[in-house]
Structures are given as structure tokens and as C-alpha cells.
Image: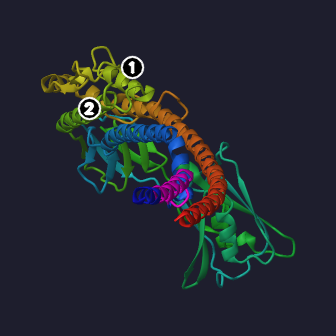
Amino acid sequence: MLAPTTTSGLTTTAAVADSASVGSALATALGGGTGIDMTALAGNLATAQFAGRLARIDNQNNRLSTQISQATQLKSDLLTLANSVGGAVRTGALSAQPSVANSAVASATLPAGSAGVSGSYSLEVLTLASPQVLNSPPFAAATTPTGSGSLTINFGTIAGTTFAADAAHAPVTVAIAAGATLADVASAINSSGAGITAYVATSGDGAHLVLKGQQGAANGFTISADETAGDPGLAKLAFDPAAAAAAVAAGTPTATIAAIANDAHFKLDGVDRTATSNTVPNAAPGLSLSLTGTNTGTPTQITFSDPTSQIASSMQELTNALNTLVGEVNTNLDPASGGLSADTGARALRRQLATLAGAKIMPNAAAGAPATLSDLGLSVNKDGTFKLDGARLNATIKANPQAVAAMFTTGLYGVYGTLDSMARNLTSASDSGSLSGSIVRYTGLQTRLGTERAKLATKQDNLRTRLVSQFAHSNSVVSGSRSTLSFLQNQATASANRSN
């Protein structure tokens, strides 16, 4: 009897335990009571769904950023190279610069695009170019009314009491309004575009209108006055060399001439020369002058510097800079590791560099004169780097110094012109095959990737929202199932207790 009772008790206890285990397993299977964060789960699932595609976009974007950086650096280095050569050329250090022994007489410069010359010039300045200056009779003050009407300025050459009008220089008429003062007349003349400077100067006898023209004998001028009836006075500002003396004698003074317009008169290598201005461009080959004083009877010398050593140094610096650029290009074009291995702009730059030494940069060079960088000793190695043959450079400079110096001037041709043209072409934003074109293309691809990534991010967020909604419904179902399970567990427990 004892055995069955014991057996029955064990059986009942086991049944209760089995019922609880089944309920717990069911709850676990449905997610109930496990502490799972359904929102986080939805986010993780959505992230996993799009992780691969987003990672590919990010990797592509990183590669594009590298390509943009490398192309931008190449562009910057190329422009820097051209600009540095241009800076050296513009300083004149690579040209035969003129200098005047007597700096009080003149200063000398190279005409644009000139390489200078060897040898020297002698310079004797006899007279400087000067402008005509007129002084009006005195007025009480700058605010004194002058009368109204108009003043007509005629241009030409004055010699004594004669005036020869310049037919090529049209007269200028200046209107003078009623009530105008001496200061107003000066302002009106300055605004007329006549090329005459007018101002009021006050001295012990009153205020004078001073008129100053341009340098050069042909820039002399006369002034005629047309007075408004009933408002006289402008005639005092008139000037005519033939009538001036008579006007003074008659007691009706007009403007008087304080300085006559003159041309510059100088001798260059003993040859008489004139100029309408003290600035004399292209006075001789390789020479522009700015005359500042006279040295009658004591000519001064104009000599030219020797730029040979500066050119040699500049060529070595250019070779070094080109090799730095070539190294950068080769690194970026490396098929295994270069970010620009298939870039059209970088490849175009390498092709240009490969042909640079042999390119004819002086197309108008005389027969036998240096016309390429290879003539100056520059050559290209098999790996694309450059080397400079100093002996050949020195021999070329010695044999034809003027032609070599001409290669280091501003302009379309020569070392600077060639590098500048190459840099401009290879960095032109309008050329899709240039470095700038590559940068524009890569930037556009990045923009499209950004748009694509934003769309994927939106899809990912929509999926997460949808999963959260689905999991919320599942939680509701699980909660109902747990209530039913709890009821069944309680019933099973109660039944087991009654059996005991």
C-alpha cells in the first residue's frame, strides 16, 4: 500500500513540474518575460539589412575624397611651380638689367618681354620734358565769382607769340554756370577730361587759377572765353600768346604763361633724340628710360648686369621642383596603390612632363639659338625624372647669352610662358580631361553618393519603424498568450493539489 501512494505522489509532483516547464518554455518562445528590447531589436535588424550597401557607399566616398585630395594637391603644386618661375622672371634677376651710373639723370628698366643686351650706352640729357603752366590774374579769393559762359581749350604748340593748333587734338569746351566761383571753375576744368590740372593758389596779391597741362611741346594750349551777356568776368581767364602782351599793356590782363610745354631732348650714344615725355619706352634695344635730370656736357653710362649665375641656379631649382612633381605624379598613378591610377588629368600631366624638355619653347628663335629646355641641359630619365647637364647649360650661356636670357622673360614663349600655359591648360575647369575636370567629376560623384546614402538611410528608418510596429503587435499577442498560460498553470497546480 505504501508503494502506490508514494508512486502517486511522485507522479503528481512531476506533472505539476512539467506543466510549469511547458508554460515557461512557451513564454520564452513568444518573447514574453525575456526582457528583450523590441525597439532595439528592430533597429539592429534594419541596420543589418542595409549595412552592406551603406558600407560600400562609404568606402566609395572615402576613395573619392582621397582622389579629390590628391588631384587638388597636384593642381596646387603645378600652379605653384609655374608661379614661382614667373616670380623669378618678373623680378628681373634672370635678365640683363640696365643701370645708370648717374642716378640723378635717369633710371633705366627693361621693356616688357626684353632680355636686355650686353655692352653699354652713353646718355646725355639736355632738357627735360615739361608741361605748360598758366596763371590767371589775381581774384580777391577762391570764392570770388568769375562770371558765367564757357571756356574753350585748344591744344597745339606755342613758340613765342605764335600758336600752331594740333588738328589731331580736339578742343574741349567747359561750361561755367552763373554764380560760379574761381574754385568752381577749377573743379569744372578738372572734370572736363581735357587732361589739364586746375587748382587755386593764394598769394600776397590774391587767389590765382593755375592750369597745368601734359608734358610735351604739342600739349601747349590756349583758352578762349565766351561770356554770358550781363555776367562778364571769364575773359580774365583767357590766354592767347599773341594777345597776352597787348592785354597787359591795355590794362585788361588775362592769364599769363608761367612755363612753356617742352619735349625732352637727350643724346643716346651721341645721337640727338627727343621725346614728348620724360618716360621713354624702348629708347633702344633692351632699354626704357625715365629721365629725371640734366647732365649737359657730362654723359653718363648705362650698363647691363650679367644674369649667368642666376640662370644656372634657377635651372637647377627648376629641375629639383620638376622632380618633386614627377615623384608625386608617379606615386598617385601607381597601379597598385595610387589613388589616381586611372585619372585622365594626372595622366595628361605625366605626358606633358615627359615631353617638356624637348618641346620648342622659343618658336621664333634664330637658327642655331637655343629653343628648347634640352638646349639648356635639361633631359628626362627613363623613370620620368629630370636631370640637368650643367656643362651643356654653361656652354649654351657662353655661346649665346642674349638668346638664353630671352628664354627667361615674360610673354607667351620661354620657360615661364611654357610652364604657365601648361599649368593653365591642365587646371582648366572647362576641360574634363584636366586636373580641375577630375576634381569636378569626383565631387559630382560624391554628391550623387550622398544622395543615394540619404535614400538608403530613409529606407532603413522606414524598415525600423515597420518592424517596431510589427513587434509591438507580437508583444500584444504574447501578453495575451502569457495570460492564458498563467491561467492554465494555475489550473494545473490547483488540480495537482486536489489530487494530494
Residue at point 58%, 84% (across, down): 205
227 lies left or right of 303:
right
Label 1 crowding class (10 Å Cα cut-off): few <14, some 14-19, many 20+?
A: few
Residue at point 23%, 32% (across, down): 319
| Residue 23 shows up from this direction | yes
Residue at point 22%, 18% (across, down): 382
Kindly identify which numbered label has been placed on residue 329. none
| Residue 412 shows up from this direction | no
Tag 1 residue: 363
Image marks 1 and 2: residues in contact by CB distance under 8 Å: no
Question: Residue 280: horizontal and vertical position, in percent?
Answer: 42, 44
Task: Name the residue nearer the viewer: 214 or 84.
Answer: 84
Question: Residue 362: horizontal and vertical position, in percent?
Answer: 36, 23
Question: Up-down: is 188 above or below 443?
Answer: below
Magenta segment, prevailing SS (helix, strand or loop): helix
Tag 2 residue: 327
Residue pushed farthest left?
391
Residue pushed farthest top?
367
The magenta region covers 11-34
Dot 2 lies on which element?
helix
Question: Residue 442: horizontal and vertical position, in percent?
Answer: 50, 36
Question: Up-down: is 300 above or below 246?
Answer: above
Q: Amino acid at mark 1?
A: Pro
Question: Residue 40: horizontal and vertical position, in percent?
Answer: 52, 56
Question: Up-down: is 444 above or below 494?
Answer: above
Numbered disc in front, either 1 or 2 = 2
Magenta stretch containing residue 257, yes or no?
A: no
Label 2 crowding class (10 Å Cα cut-off): few <14, some 14-19, many 20+?
A: some
Residue at point 40%, 52% (across, down): 127
Q: CA distance from mark 1 to mark 2?
A: 30 Å
